[in-house]
Amino acid sequence: MRSEDIASVFNRSGADYEASAADLIQVSAARLVERLNLSQSDDLIDLGCGAGAVIAFAAPLLSSGSAIGVDLAAEQLALARDRFRRSRLSPRFLHQHAAHTDLPRRSADGVALNLVLPYADRPEQLLKEATRLTRPGGRVGATVFGQPFFGRPGTRLLGQLERRGVAWPEVELQYNLHEYAMLALLDSVDERRLDCVEVEEIEREFWWGSFEDWWSMLGWLGLLPTGRDHMLGSIAQALREDERVVDPDGQVRCLVKILLLTAVSVADERWE
């Protein structure tokens, strides 16, 4: 899916994007900030910042530092600006393509990409931009959905889509984060490269109070095919009646795997 189309999805989602999966987004953002090892005077850049969840977790750590969020979704940026309207940190939020910013090179001690890479048409370019922006010794961190993307309910959804000739939602869910990281690191960026690449798997159970809450969340996160309302209505009815999706108490419980990548920006020996 093109970046402009993804931005359109999240503009329509508005505040529902973060509210519909608050626990999931907060867990991934908190762990990402933790692994960036930020100090009080560091400068943080959040690529694909949405409504600012990562910066919200980082703000208490940056007592004398700064934060910049970048996103193509203007509605999400408006929510982020409102969120930090009275914040001591006073982050800047830029309406730009996260893979091609006009920010100066080596301008951050930490660069975050929280649940962003699967939405990119060229994920490796996002990682290259993160490398360009990170100072030597700084850290890059990224999170994506792992396998299974939403536990047994997600697996049942994918099965229903496949039976109707739609292999996957438009967002890339079968994601090999380490493979993309290695692809992005083949060449140096601004005489630097990423090193000490680690991929950690975080597995947590999340739940939604009803099938409707879960189904709406999939839409707000852009995880359902667009323009297929009749087909999706049929799938929703089948899943609503599936005991492997909806618990007897009406909740939808999902075991979600989040992959967390961290790496350190270092000088490339070929340029020394």
Image (cartoon, grey):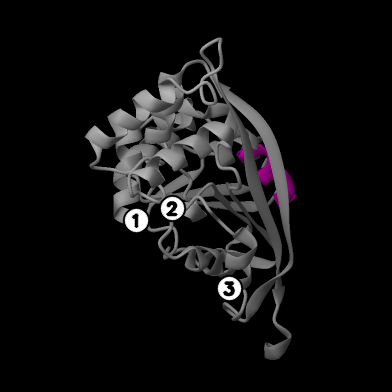
Span highlighted in magenta in the image = 28-38
Q: Using the image as rendered, state which of residue 65 and residue 188 is in the foreground.
A: 188
Q: Secondary structure at mark 1?
A: loop
Q: Secondary structure at mark 2?
A: helix
Is residue 20 shown above or below 75?
above
Q: Mark 2 — residue?
A: 119
Q: Is residue 220 left or right of residue 144?
A: left
Q: Using the image as rendered, state which of residue 133 and residue 116 is in the foreground.
A: 116
| Amino acid at circle 3 | Leu
Is residue 98 shown above or below 255?
below
Please tell me how crowded label 1 is: few (under 14), some (14-19), or many (20+) other residues with Cα within 10 Å: few
Q: Is residue 256 left or right of residue 268?
A: left
Q: Report, in whole angstroms, how far the alpha carbon at label 3 lies from the one at label 1.
A: 20 Å
Residue 66 point in image, percent of width and height: 59, 48
Is residue 184 shown above or below 59?
below
| Amino acid at circle 2 | Tyr
Q: Report, in whole angstroms, how far the alpha carbon at label 2 lies from the one at label 3.
A: 17 Å
Q: Mark 3 — residue?
A: 183
Res 259 visible: yes
Is residue 164 shown above or below 270?
above
Q: Using the image as rendered, state which of residue 28 and residue 86 is in the foreground.
A: 28
Q: CB atoms at circles 2 and 1 under 8 Å apart?
A: yes
Q: Using the image as rendered, state which of residue 241 and residue 76 is in the foreground.
A: 241
Q: Which of the 4 image quarters holds residue 257?
A: top right
Q: Residue at x 67, y 55 (%)?
A: 261
Q: Secondary structure at mark 3?
A: helix
